[in-house]
Amino acid sequence: MRNILLLATTVLVAGAAFAAPAQSAGLPKGAAHNIVLVHGAFVDQTSWKPVADILTKKGYNVTLVENPLTSLAADVDATKQALAKQNGKTVLVGHSWAGVVITQAGDDPKVSALVYVSAFAPDVGESLAALAKNGPATEGTNAIHPDDKGNLYIDPKVFPTAVAADLPLKIAESLANSQLPLNHTAYEAPVDIAAWHDKPTFYVISTKDKVIAPETQKLFAARIKAETTEVAGSHASLVVHAEEVASVIEKAALTN
């Protein structure tokens, strides 16, 4: 999975993420210097690499959380461990399933802002299962099925068009066949903290998303009173539209 995602990011965003001129480590006064990026289900932390490279070159201290995807508590713990290592103000960012994770973990006093990228944004007592059930069915959610161990996958035949339509087909197919499953207990676990009630929030809506419907993303963004940015991308917009996503994160870093 790691090698496939690194290949995808190299092919698609080499011009943006790797050719950007290095800048001084001196960031604007008052900016959060730390960025913690949390990945969603079915992929690993390298899905954030294009965004991480852009932000690192601008002087930010960027941490990629490696979610075990075995339970909500386990992913929240992995995120809290990453936050514990930060020194000072930190922007916490989540993609897809990780919106649930940062909602729970984001009450940390170091977290100065939350950024949701094509992500679920539950309120207290809500689970991913409940949000998916109440929202409009999509090609992606209809294709999520458990195996005999209770691990959830997206049908590999549907994955390329539903999740990664922006990626080259061969890479999307490889990702489909190398998925990291989300355990059903994570899917069903409600959050008991909704950090967005007390933190500045930002939301990147992917207008061509076939996993979380764009209209659902807009409802999440409105409910959490987020500053909203739209990108014309699929659920994989954090890879294909890395520059735009990084720009939103930078804006969040400047929030007082």
Image: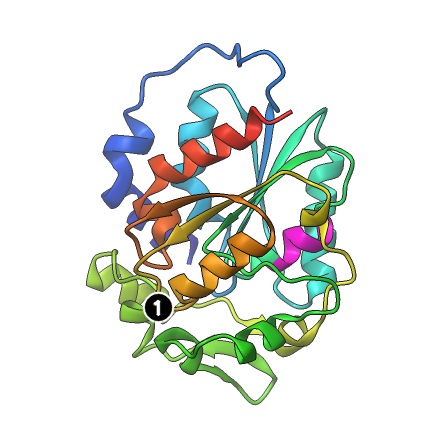
From the image, give the main secondary structure of the stretch colored magenta.
helix
Where, by quadrant of the figure, is residue 252 drawn? top right
Identify the coloring. rainbow
Q: Which residue is mark 1?
A: 210
- Identify the residue at image location x=32%, y=70%: 162
- Is residue 134 something one can see in this rendering? yes
* Residues shaded magenta: 100-105
Q: Residue at x 61, y 64 (%)?
A: 69
Horizontal and vertical percent position of residue 249: 49, 34
Q: Which of the 4 image quadrants contains residue 84? A: top right
Which residue corresponds to the image point at 72% horizontal and 25% vertical from the top-left? 87
Query: Considering depth in this image, is 188 or 148 the residue closer to the camera?
Result: 188
On the question of residue 43 being in view, the answer is no
Using the image as rendered, state which of residue 236 and residue 30 is in the foreground: 30
195 relative to 219 in the view: left or right: right
User: How many marks overall?
Assistant: 1
Dot 1 crowding, Cα within 10 Å, few <14, some 14–19, many 20+: many
Residue 75 image offset from top left, x and y in percent: 67, 57
Q: Is residue 229 above or below residue 23?
A: below
Q: Quadrant of the N terminus?
A: bottom left
Q: Is residue 104 magenta?
A: yes
Instruction: From the viewer's perspective, tell me whether residue 132 is left or right of residue 21.
Output: right
